[in-house]
Image (spheres, helix red, strand yellow):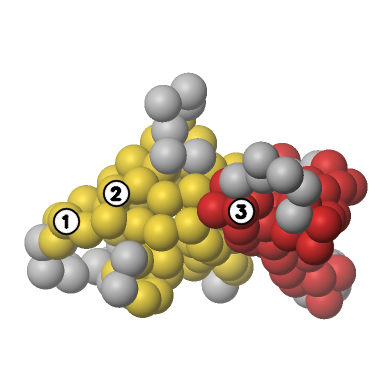
Amino acid sequence: MATLHLEIVTQERRLYSGDVDMVVAPGSEGEMGILPHHASLLTTLKEGVLRVKHGGTEELFSIGGGFLEVQPDHVIVLADAAEKADEIDIARAEQARERAEKMLKDRPAGANIEEALAALRRAQIRVTVAQRQGVRRRERPEIKSSE
């Protein structure tokens, strides 16, 4: 089966580099699936969940916007911010979500509502990614060889 080489890069580090079967990205105009031999493309990404499928498994990343470059044999994600699901501190993400929700509910004087909404979106994405990846891990029992 044909694969794509995927690179996920932020300003701070290379988060992922490897061959994959499919990438599903949160494009600015909607979710897009990228398979091997896809037409060349350059687009912006919005905040969301980046899904990477390889070898029958799916790995999730939290993406905070950026750019996506697609070539027939490789994909480069230049993310403003990105985290692997297993790197997300779910308790911290939930606290950030609660702070943003409180800010939006209380609307204190001088509060920037747009920043609070953006913080809420980022926190919700991080919580979703961590929870979905955790659910996937629990639902897939390890297969033991009968040899």
Q: CA distance from mark 3 to mark 1?
A: 31 Å
Residue 25 figure quarter:
bottom left
Pointer 3: residues within 10 angstroms few (<14), some, or many (20+)? Answer: some
Pointer 1: residues within 10 angstroms few (<14), some, or many (20+)? Answer: few
User: Which residue is labeled 3 in the image?
Assistant: 113
Ranked by sequence position, the earlier of labels 3 and 1 is 1
Observer-nearest of 135 and 48: 48
User: Which residue is labeled 2 in the image?
Assistant: 67
Three-letter amino acid code at the position of disc 2? Phe
Residue 50 seen from this side:
yes
Q: CA distance from mark 3 to mark 2?
A: 26 Å
Residue 28 figure quarter:
bottom left
Residue sitting at x 34%, y 66%: 27
- The reply, left or right, for residue 45 in relation to residue 12 is left
Residue sitting at x 41%, y 59%: 46
Observer-nearest of 69 and 43: 43
Residue 30 x/y as whole percent: 36, 76
User: Which residue is labeled 1 in the image?
Assistant: 42
Residue 121 x/y as whole percent: 61, 59
Three-letter amino acid code at the position of disc 1? Leu
* Residue extending furthest toward the top: 12
Q: Nearer the viewer, mark 3 or mark 1?
A: 3
Residue sitting at x 21%, y 52%: 69
Q: CA distance from mark 2 to mark 1?
A: 7 Å
Give the SS element for disc 3. Answer: helix
Ranked by sequence position, the earlier of labels 2 and 1 is 1
Residue sitting at x 52%, y 62%: 48
Give the SS element for disc 1. Answer: strand
Check the image and report above or below for 19 versus 24: above
Observer-nearest of 50 and 3: 50
